[in-house]
Image (cartoon, helix red, strand yellow):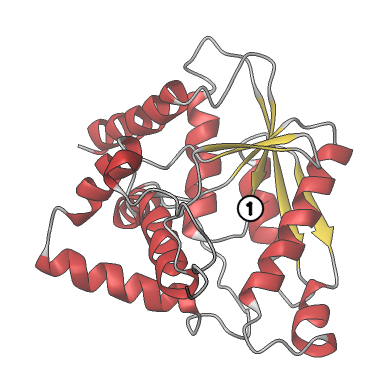
Protein backbone atom coordinates (compact mmCIF):
# COMPACT_ATOMS: atom_id res chain seq x y z
CA UNK A 1 0.00 0.00 0.00
CA UNK A 2 2.81 2.39 0.92
CA UNK A 3 4.68 1.63 -2.31
CA UNK A 4 1.60 2.31 -4.43
CA UNK A 5 0.96 5.64 -2.69
CA UNK A 6 4.60 6.65 -3.11
CA UNK A 7 4.44 5.75 -6.80
CA UNK A 8 1.25 7.78 -7.22
CA UNK A 9 2.74 10.80 -5.41
CA UNK A 10 5.93 10.70 -7.48
CA UNK A 11 3.79 10.37 -10.60
CA UNK A 12 2.00 13.65 -9.84
CA UNK A 13 5.32 15.43 -9.32
CA UNK A 14 6.81 13.94 -12.48
CA UNK A 15 3.76 15.03 -14.48
CA UNK A 16 4.07 18.63 -13.27
CA UNK A 17 7.79 18.61 -14.04
CA UNK A 18 7.14 17.25 -17.54
CA UNK A 19 4.10 19.42 -18.34
CA UNK A 20 5.93 22.65 -17.53
CA UNK A 21 9.49 21.66 -18.46
CA UNK A 22 10.73 22.33 -14.94
CA UNK A 23 13.90 20.23 -14.90
CA UNK A 24 16.46 19.64 -17.64
CA UNK A 25 19.62 17.63 -17.93
CA UNK A 26 22.49 19.28 -16.05
CA UNK A 27 20.33 21.47 -13.82
CA UNK A 28 21.71 22.49 -10.45
CA UNK A 29 18.66 22.99 -8.28
CA UNK A 30 18.42 24.85 -5.00
CA UNK A 31 15.64 23.53 -2.78
CA UNK A 32 14.22 26.10 -0.40
CA UNK A 33 14.16 24.31 2.93
CA UNK A 34 12.17 25.70 5.86
CA UNK A 35 11.90 22.60 8.00
CA UNK A 36 8.14 22.40 7.42
CA UNK A 37 6.40 19.39 5.93
CA UNK A 38 6.07 20.92 2.45
CA UNK A 39 9.74 21.69 1.89
CA UNK A 40 10.87 18.43 3.50
CA UNK A 41 8.49 16.48 1.25
CA UNK A 42 9.76 18.36 -1.82
CA UNK A 43 13.41 17.61 -1.12
CA UNK A 44 12.59 13.97 -0.35
CA UNK A 45 10.58 13.36 -3.52
CA UNK A 46 13.02 15.19 -5.82
CA UNK A 47 15.82 13.09 -4.38
CA UNK A 48 13.85 9.89 -5.04
CA UNK A 49 12.92 10.93 -8.58
CA UNK A 50 16.46 11.81 -9.61
CA UNK A 51 17.42 8.17 -9.09
CA UNK A 52 14.72 6.98 -11.48
CA UNK A 53 14.75 9.35 -14.45
CA UNK A 54 17.26 9.67 -17.31
CA UNK A 55 17.72 13.36 -16.50
CA UNK A 56 20.86 14.23 -14.55
CA UNK A 57 20.26 17.00 -12.02
CA UNK A 58 21.79 17.98 -8.70
CA UNK A 59 20.14 19.25 -5.52
CA UNK A 60 21.38 21.71 -2.92
CA UNK A 61 19.21 22.60 0.07
CA UNK A 62 19.22 26.19 1.32
CA UNK A 63 17.71 27.39 4.59
CA UNK A 64 17.35 31.15 4.98
CA UNK A 65 17.92 31.62 8.70
CA UNK A 66 15.94 34.67 9.90
CA UNK A 67 17.85 34.89 13.17
CA UNK A 68 15.61 33.16 15.69
CA UNK A 69 16.35 29.72 17.21
CA UNK A 70 15.61 26.73 15.00
CA UNK A 71 16.61 23.06 14.90
CA UNK A 72 19.25 23.38 12.20
CA UNK A 73 20.69 19.96 13.07
CA UNK A 74 17.43 18.24 12.08
CA UNK A 75 17.51 19.76 8.59
CA UNK A 76 21.24 19.20 8.21
CA UNK A 77 20.93 15.52 9.16
CA UNK A 78 17.94 15.13 6.84
CA UNK A 79 20.07 16.39 3.93
CA UNK A 80 23.14 14.34 4.88
CA UNK A 81 21.07 11.15 4.83
CA UNK A 82 20.17 11.93 1.22
CA UNK A 83 23.63 13.06 0.18
CA UNK A 84 22.31 16.58 -0.52
CA UNK A 85 24.54 19.58 0.34
CA UNK A 86 22.98 21.94 2.91
CA UNK A 87 23.57 25.67 3.34
CA UNK A 88 22.38 27.58 6.40
CA UNK A 89 22.20 31.20 5.18
CA UNK A 90 22.27 33.35 8.32
CA UNK A 91 20.47 36.69 8.01
CA UNK A 92 19.05 39.45 10.21
CA UNK A 93 15.61 39.30 8.56
CA UNK A 94 13.80 38.66 11.84
CA UNK A 95 15.37 41.70 13.48
CA UNK A 96 14.68 43.93 10.49
CA UNK A 97 11.03 42.89 10.16
CA UNK A 98 9.96 42.73 13.80
CA UNK A 99 12.23 45.26 15.50
CA UNK A 100 13.77 47.76 13.10
CA UNK A 101 10.66 48.14 10.94
CA UNK A 102 8.10 46.89 13.48
CA UNK A 103 5.78 45.90 10.64
CA UNK A 104 2.09 45.51 11.49
CA UNK A 105 1.74 43.09 8.55
CA UNK A 106 5.24 41.61 8.45
CA UNK A 107 4.68 38.70 6.05
CA UNK A 108 5.09 40.62 2.78
CA UNK A 109 8.37 42.26 3.82
CA UNK A 110 9.68 39.01 5.32
CA UNK A 111 8.84 37.09 2.13
CA UNK A 112 10.58 39.69 -0.06
CA UNK A 113 13.73 39.65 2.09
CA UNK A 114 13.82 35.85 2.21
CA UNK A 115 13.28 35.65 -1.55
CA UNK A 116 16.20 37.98 -2.16
CA UNK A 117 18.42 36.07 0.27
CA UNK A 118 17.73 32.64 -1.22
CA UNK A 119 18.04 33.88 -4.82
CA UNK A 120 21.39 35.51 -4.11
CA UNK A 121 22.63 32.45 -2.23
CA UNK A 122 21.59 30.12 -5.04
CA UNK A 123 23.34 32.33 -7.60
CA UNK A 124 26.50 32.53 -5.48
CA UNK A 125 26.53 28.73 -5.23
CA UNK A 126 26.35 28.41 -9.01
CA UNK A 127 22.80 27.00 -9.03
CA UNK A 128 20.45 27.80 -11.89
CA UNK A 129 17.05 26.81 -10.52
CA UNK A 130 15.15 27.15 -7.25
CA UNK A 131 12.48 24.62 -6.23
CA UNK A 132 9.88 25.65 -3.66
CA UNK A 133 7.39 23.42 -1.84
CA UNK A 134 4.26 25.29 -2.89
CA UNK A 135 1.25 23.10 -3.69
CA UNK A 136 -2.23 23.58 -5.13
CA UNK A 137 -3.70 24.94 -1.90
CA UNK A 138 -1.00 27.62 -1.82
CA UNK A 139 -1.94 28.68 -5.36
CA UNK A 140 -5.63 28.88 -4.46
CA UNK A 141 -4.92 30.82 -1.27
CA UNK A 142 -2.71 33.23 -3.21
CA UNK A 143 -5.56 33.74 -5.69
CA UNK A 144 -7.98 34.65 -2.89
CA UNK A 145 -5.43 36.93 -1.21
CA UNK A 146 -4.92 38.83 -4.47
CA UNK A 147 -8.66 39.04 -5.10
CA UNK A 148 -9.66 40.13 -1.61
CA UNK A 149 -6.78 42.43 -0.72
CA UNK A 150 -5.73 43.90 -4.10
CA UNK A 151 -8.73 43.34 -6.38
CA UNK A 152 -6.74 41.30 -8.91
CA UNK A 153 -7.12 37.85 -10.49
CA UNK A 154 -3.60 36.59 -9.82
CA UNK A 155 -1.66 33.63 -8.48
CA UNK A 156 1.85 32.29 -8.91
CA UNK A 157 3.04 30.29 -11.92
CA UNK A 158 4.48 26.74 -11.88
CA UNK A 159 7.62 28.15 -13.55
CA UNK A 160 8.98 31.70 -13.35
CA UNK A 161 12.25 33.09 -14.67
CA UNK A 162 13.58 35.82 -12.38
CA UNK A 163 15.48 38.42 -14.38
CA UNK A 164 17.42 39.99 -11.52
CA UNK A 165 19.03 36.78 -10.29
CA UNK A 166 18.92 34.72 -13.49
CA UNK A 167 17.35 31.91 -11.46
CA UNK A 168 14.33 29.93 -12.69
CA UNK A 169 11.78 29.27 -9.96
CA UNK A 170 9.92 25.92 -10.13
CA UNK A 171 7.10 24.43 -8.06
CA UNK A 172 7.06 20.65 -8.68
CA UNK A 173 4.25 19.87 -6.19
CA UNK A 174 1.72 22.19 -7.83
CA UNK A 175 -0.66 19.32 -8.73
CA UNK A 176 -0.91 18.13 -5.11
CA UNK A 177 -3.15 19.43 -2.34
CA UNK A 178 -1.84 20.45 1.06
CA UNK A 179 -3.52 17.46 2.71
CA UNK A 180 -1.90 15.11 0.22
CA UNK A 181 1.55 16.52 0.98
CA UNK A 182 0.89 16.23 4.71
CA UNK A 183 -0.18 12.59 4.29
CA UNK A 184 2.92 11.87 2.22
CA UNK A 185 5.20 13.42 4.86
CA UNK A 186 3.57 11.26 7.52
CA UNK A 187 3.82 8.05 5.49
CA UNK A 188 7.48 8.70 4.75
CA UNK A 189 8.22 9.60 8.41
CA UNK A 190 9.74 12.91 7.42
CA UNK A 191 10.92 15.14 10.29
CA UNK A 192 9.23 18.50 10.75
CA UNK A 193 10.89 21.49 12.43
CA UNK A 194 8.49 23.71 14.38
CA UNK A 195 8.28 27.29 13.16
CA UNK A 196 9.12 29.88 15.83
CA UNK A 197 8.00 32.86 13.74
CA UNK A 198 6.34 35.38 16.12
CA UNK A 199 3.22 35.56 13.94
CA UNK A 200 3.01 31.87 13.02
CA UNK A 201 -0.66 30.88 12.68
CA UNK A 202 -1.92 34.48 12.84
CA UNK A 203 -1.38 35.67 9.28
CA UNK A 204 -3.63 36.61 6.36
CA UNK A 205 -2.42 33.39 4.74
CA UNK A 206 -3.96 31.45 7.63
CA UNK A 207 -7.24 33.30 7.07
CA UNK A 208 -7.19 32.16 3.44
CA UNK A 209 -6.46 28.58 4.52
CA UNK A 210 -9.59 28.68 6.67
CA UNK A 211 -11.59 30.19 3.80
CA UNK A 212 -10.50 27.52 1.31
CA UNK A 213 -11.08 24.77 3.87
CA UNK A 214 -14.61 26.00 4.57
CA UNK A 215 -15.48 26.32 0.88
CA UNK A 216 -14.08 22.84 0.21
CA UNK A 217 -16.36 21.34 2.82
CA UNK A 218 -19.36 22.82 1.03
CA UNK A 219 -17.98 22.22 -2.47
CA UNK A 220 -15.75 19.08 -2.35
CA UNK A 221 -14.53 19.54 -5.95
CA UNK A 222 -13.31 23.10 -5.32
CA UNK A 223 -9.59 22.32 -5.54
CA UNK A 224 -10.00 20.25 -8.70
CA UNK A 225 -12.06 23.01 -10.29
CA UNK A 226 -9.41 25.60 -9.43
CA UNK A 227 -6.69 23.47 -10.99
CA UNK A 228 -8.74 23.22 -14.18
CA UNK A 229 -9.38 26.98 -14.12
CA UNK A 230 -5.68 27.78 -13.67
CA UNK A 231 -4.81 25.58 -16.65
CA UNK A 232 -7.60 26.73 -18.97
CA UNK A 233 -7.93 30.47 -18.28
CA UNK A 234 -10.14 32.11 -20.90
CA UNK A 235 -9.57 35.86 -20.69
CA UNK A 236 -12.21 36.45 -23.37
CA UNK A 237 -14.88 35.73 -20.78
CA UNK A 238 -13.60 38.49 -18.50
CA UNK A 239 -14.17 42.21 -18.95
CA UNK A 240 -12.10 43.88 -21.69
CA UNK A 241 -9.77 46.80 -20.87
CA UNK A 242 -11.51 50.16 -20.54
CA UNK A 243 -11.45 52.31 -23.67
CA UNK A 244 -11.31 55.47 -21.55
CA UNK A 245 -9.59 55.68 -18.19
CA UNK A 246 -10.85 59.19 -17.49
CA UNK A 247 -14.49 60.27 -17.31
CA UNK A 248 -15.81 62.29 -20.22
CA UNK A 249 -16.00 66.05 -19.53
CA UNK A 250 -19.40 67.58 -18.97
CA UNK A 251 -20.92 68.97 -22.17
Considering the numbered disc 1 on the image, is that residue within a helix, a strand or a loop? loop
189 or 15: nearer the viewer:
15
Q: Answer left or right for 198 relative to 120.
A: left
- 78, above or below 228, in the image: below
Q: Residue at x 31, y 53 (%)?
A: 183
In the rendering, at what x and y percent does residue 149 appear? 47, 74
Q: Answer left or right for 232 relative to 51.
A: left
Residue 3: name its quadrant.
top left
Question: How many residues crowd around disc 1 within 10 Å: few (fewer than 14), some, or many (20 or more)?
Answer: many
Residue extending farthest top: 54
- 47, above or below 165, in the image: above
Q: Residue at x 69, y 16 (%)?
A: 26
Q: Answer left or right for 68 relative to 245.
A: right
Residue 209: name its quadrant.
bottom left
Q: Residue at x 55, y 72 (%)?
A: 194
Q: Residue at x 65, y 55 (%)?
A: 75
Q: Which residue is mark 1?
A: 33
In the rendering, at what x and y percent does residue 232 appear? 30, 35
Quadrant occupied by the N terminus: top left
Residue 30: name its quadrant.
top right
Amino acid sequence: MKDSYLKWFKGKVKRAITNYGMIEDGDKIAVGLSGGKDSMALLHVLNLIRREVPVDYRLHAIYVNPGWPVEIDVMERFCQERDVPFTNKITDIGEVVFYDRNEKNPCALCANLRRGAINNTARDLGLNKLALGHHLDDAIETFFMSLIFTGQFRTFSPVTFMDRSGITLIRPMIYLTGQTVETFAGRENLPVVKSLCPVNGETKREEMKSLVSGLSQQYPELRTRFLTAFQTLDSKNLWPPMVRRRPMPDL
